[in-house]
Image (cartoon, grey):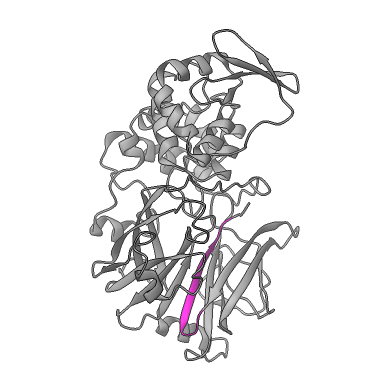
């Protein structure tokens, strides 16, 4: 799956086709020609399909789902991308999956096409998992194609209820509780037998960078509700939950995420105290005229749990799937102090802040990523085993790094591939005194 990507990313990519000449067809349908390829325009969604049989099936059997998808920008982009793929064009499907955030509208459309249009040549008639190699393995291995189809038909299993506490603790970091927790469901179990068995090498992530330059993050429709289920675990053992914390979503006009200002605007965010290690947070994207009141994936965490400083959690690109189950690891003060002492650094918790990060490729943890911050402070990287490599210039197979003792304020983080210099992304963040800013550096648009 994509992006610390332990769950199926039902994503969306591409955009409106350019350079097209519209020719009116019969029966209200549009026909387009682009670079000599005839495309068939759907009535229910306005999407241009390479397969007339797929267009017809979607309009006849999945019109409601297609229309709903057309009203959600990310879903429309994904539908546009997949409409150009045949079911066995794994490179095309994989590229769509690795470049666009998922939406529940796309989940519903895939479920409908899997049920009604599986023989109509639709690129969206199967759920998406990983990149080209994973998609090909699941389609071609005996038993896996059938398991994927049955899994695709049930949108409830594409977005099941979050893990129970015991399941979550047992699965981190393998599934991290943002994967498909209802593994007792037969179709989920059958598919996981493929992805963790015969297709494990193809689906486990291999620093695939084919999405660079084509990642998209469409702005959601105004008023879109976003439900987050956030679990926090200790960074030094991955399994013990961090309890007794509060979490709040931060808006564009409040980059410092001041709790008093956040709590005063309940129409935009919700503050959720918890003692269980899991918080449920609901945010709402405001209408365009409410400039700056959008949630861009920036969360403030404060905790009374012994030894944990405040934390800012960033999401790049911003979370679009709803509901979303997310697990993040928090660094304790003791762990931060011990790590810094090992490289001869004393942390200033009074007037300075810090950054910890993990780097990911299009489909998994990413070695070979060079990170810089405005200000030019030294970036430290963890090695393949436990421990810091003070002189390393890029991430190892762990994908982890940190920057201590930063002056508070706005920063730009830039990630590039060390071998080629190719840009992975630029990320705008805040550093706050006495807090740790946590980043997952996914490829950016």
Residue 236 visible in the shown view: no
Relative vertical location of residue 322 with respect to residue 143 in this rendering, above or below: below
User: In which image quadrant can residue 442 be found?
Assistant: bottom right
Q: Where does the image place residue 193, in percent across and percent down from the top left?
A: 37, 39
Query: Where does the magenta region start and end?
Result: 432-442
Residue under the point 36% across and 39% down: 158
Q: Nearer the viewer, residue 103 or 134?
A: 103
Q: Nearer the viewer, residue 180 or 265?
A: 265
Q: Nearer the viewer, residue 203 or 259?
A: 259
Name the chief secondary structure element in magenta. Answer: strand
User: In which image quadrant can residue 278 be found?
Assistant: bottom left
Direction top: furthest residue: 26
Relative vertical location of residue 331 with respect to residue 141 in this rendering, above or below: below
Direction front: furthest residue: 289
Numbered disc total: 0
Q: Where does the image place residue 272, in percent across and percent down from the top left?
A: 29, 66
In the picture, measured across the screen, residue 280 lies left or right of residue 100, that is left
Q: Where does the image place residue 216, in percent across and percent down from the top left?
A: 60, 46
Residue under the point 40% across and 85% down: 334
Q: Where does the image place residue 406, in percent across and percent down from the top left?
A: 58, 83
In the picture, measured across the screen, residue 230 lies left or right of residue 30, that is left
Relative vertical location of residue 410 with respect to residue 369 in this rendering, above or below: below
User: Does residue 304 belong to the magenta stretch?
Assistant: no
In the picture, measured across the screen, residue 41 lies left or right of residue 144, that is right
Residue under the point 54% across and 68% down: 357
Residue 78 visible in the shown view: yes
User: Does residue 434 belong to the magenta stretch?
Assistant: yes
In the picture, measured across the screen, residue 379 lies left or right of residue 66, that is right
């Amino acid at each position: 799956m994509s992006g610390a990507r332990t769950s199926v990313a039902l994503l969306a990519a591409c955009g409106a086709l350019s350079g097209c000449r519209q020719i009116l067809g019969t029966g209200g349908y549009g026909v387009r020609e682009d670079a000599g390829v005839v495309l068939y325009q759907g009535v229910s969604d306005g999407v241009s399909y390479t397969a007339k049989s797929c267009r017809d099936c979607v309009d006849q059997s999945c019109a409601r789902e297609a229309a709903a998808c057309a009203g959600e920008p990310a879903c429309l982009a994904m539908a546009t991308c997949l409409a150009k793929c045949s079911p066995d064009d794994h490179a095309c499907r994989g590229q769509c999956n690795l470049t666009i955030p998922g939406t529940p509208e796309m989940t519903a459309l895939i479920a409908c096409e899997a049920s009604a249009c599986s023989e109509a040549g639709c690129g969206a008639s199967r759920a998406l998992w990983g990149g080209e190699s994973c998609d090909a393995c699941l389609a071609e291995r005996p038993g896996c194609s059938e398991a994927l189809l049955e899994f695709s038909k049930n949108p409830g299993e594409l977005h099941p209820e979050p893990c129970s506490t015991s399941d979550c603790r047992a699965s981190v970091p393998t599934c991290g509780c943002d994967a498909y927790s209802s593994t007792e469901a037969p179709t989920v179990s059958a598919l996981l037998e493929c992805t963790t068995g015969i297709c494990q090498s193809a689906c486990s992530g291999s620093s695939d960078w084919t999405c660079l330059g084509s990642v998209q993050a469409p702005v959601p429709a105004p008023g879109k509700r976003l439900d987050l289920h956030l679990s926090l675990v200790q960074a030094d053992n991955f399994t013990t939950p961090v309890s007794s914390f509060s979490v709040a979503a931060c808006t564009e006009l409040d980059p410092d995420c001041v709790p008093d200002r956040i709590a005063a605007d309940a129409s935009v965010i919700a503050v959720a105290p918890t003692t269980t290690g899991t918080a449920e947070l609901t945010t709402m994207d405001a209408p365009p005229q409410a400039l700056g009141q959008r949630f861009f994936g920036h969360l403030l965490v404060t905790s009374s749990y012994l030894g944990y400083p405040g934390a800012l959690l960033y999401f790049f690109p911003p979370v679009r799937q709803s509901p979303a189950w997310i697990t993040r690891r928090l660094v304790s003060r003791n762990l931060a102090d011990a790590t810094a002492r090992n490289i001869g650094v004393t942390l200033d918790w009074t007037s300075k802040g810090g950054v910890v990060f993990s780097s990911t490729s299009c489909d998994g943890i990413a070695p070979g990523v060079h990170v810089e911050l405005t200000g030019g402070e030294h970036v430290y990287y963890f090695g393949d085993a436990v421990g810091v490599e003070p002189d390393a210039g890029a991430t190892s197979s762990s994908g982890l790094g940190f920057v201590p003792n930063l002056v508070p304020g706005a920063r730009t983080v830039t990630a590039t591939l060390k071998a080629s210099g190719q840009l992975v992304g630029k990320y705008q963040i805040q550093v706050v005194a006495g807090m740790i800013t946590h980043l997952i550096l996914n490829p950016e648009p």
